[in-house]
Amino acid sequence: MSYINPKIKAQFETLPIDLKNAILEQNVQLNTMNDLIKCLESIATEG
């Protein structure tokens, strides 16, 4: 199950729903903006 740190939850919520769902399916822990960016890059390269 993915975890989104409350400190970056506001930025996470600005993403499109499909992208948020893709992130949640990754079963990642996002504690910082850097974690979120790395996850987005990973999704983009999987494409």
Image: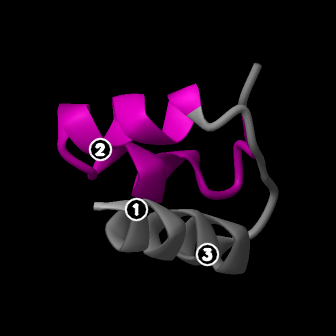
**Do the residues under discs 2 and 1 have CB atoms within 8 angstroms?**
no
Is-magenta flag for residue 22? Answer: yes
Is-magenta flag for residue 18? Answer: yes
| SS at mark 2 in the image | helix
- The span shown in magenta is 3-25
Front-lying residue, 47 or 31 = 47
Q: Which residue is mark 3?
A: 38
| SS at mark 1 in the image | helix
Q: Which numbered disc, 1 or 3, marks the residue closer to the eye?
A: 1
Left or right position of 38 against 20: right
Query: What amino acid is labelled 1 in the image?
Result: Glu
Which of marks 3 and 2 precedes in the sequence? Answer: 2
Disc 2 and disc 3: Cα gap in Å?
A: 13 Å
Q: Is residue 40 above or below residue 21?
A: below
Q: Seen from this angle, which residue lies furthest top? A: 1
Q: Main secondary structure of the magenta part?
A: helix
Which color mode does the image show? one colour
Image quadrant for the C terminus? bottom left
Q: Is residue 21 above or below residue 12?
A: above
Image quadrant for the N terminus? top right
Q: Which numbered disc, 2 or 1, marks the residue closer to the eye?
A: 1
Residue 32 % position (x, y): 75, 69
Q: Which residue is mark 1?
A: 46
Residue 19, label in figure: 2
Residue 17: image quadrant is top left
Query: What amino acid is labelled 2 in the image?
Result: Leu
